[in-house]
Amino acid sequence: MDPQNFDTLHNHLVMNVSWPSVYMFKFIAPAENRIFALIHDLFPDHAEFTDRHSAGGKYVSITVKEVMLSADEVIDRYRKASAIEGVRAL
């Protein structure tokens, strides 16, 4: 996600979501245990993870639900995930 998209998302979240709120993060990444572990490390143990592998098994979609306190927290988490090589935030 590029910086302009972060700003757009932030504005949308501030205007349309009451905080705190359960937020659903979505990522696409290569199906590598190392990458899944890096994404998992961005979230606390109580976050709810689900994953689904692509038909060919090359990629995995990862959905994470967590109670977030503000739009700033959501954007910070997306920035950290975007720094992981191969991870795309949706």
Image (spheres, helix red, strand yellow):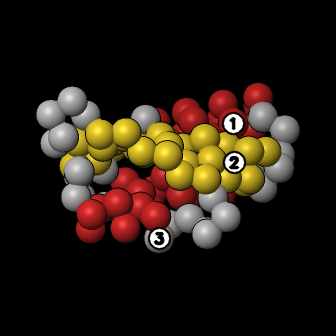
| Quarter of the image where the C terminus is located | top left
Whether residue 63 is visible here, answered yes or no, is yes
Which marked residue is nearer to the observer: mark 3 or mark 1? 3
Query: In the image, residue 66 lies at what x, y percent?
Result: 67, 53
Q: Position of residue 61 (x, y in %)?
A: 37, 40
Q: How crowded is the residue under tag 1: few (<14 C-alpha within 10 Å), some, or many (20+)?
A: some
Residue 5 in the figure: left or right of residue 68:
left
Image: 54 above or below 44: above
Query: Would you name the residue on which mark 3 appears?
Result: 41
For label 2, the crowd category at 10 Å Cα-Cα, with few meaning under 14, some 14 to 19 and many 20 or more, is many
Mark linked to residue 71: 2
> What residue type is disc 1 on?
Leu
Inter-mark Cα distance, 3 to 1: 24 Å
In the image, is residue 13 above or below residue 83? above
Question: Mark 2 belongs to which amino acid?
Answer: Ala
Q: Quadrant of residue 62?
A: top left
Which is nearer the N-term, disc 2 or disc 3? 3
Give x and y (percent) for residue 47: 63, 58
Which percent across, then down, holds residue 15? 76, 31
Q: What residue is pinned by disc 1? A: 13
Q: Which element type, helix, strand or loop, lies under badge 3?
A: loop
Residue appearing at x 27%, y 63% in the figure: 33
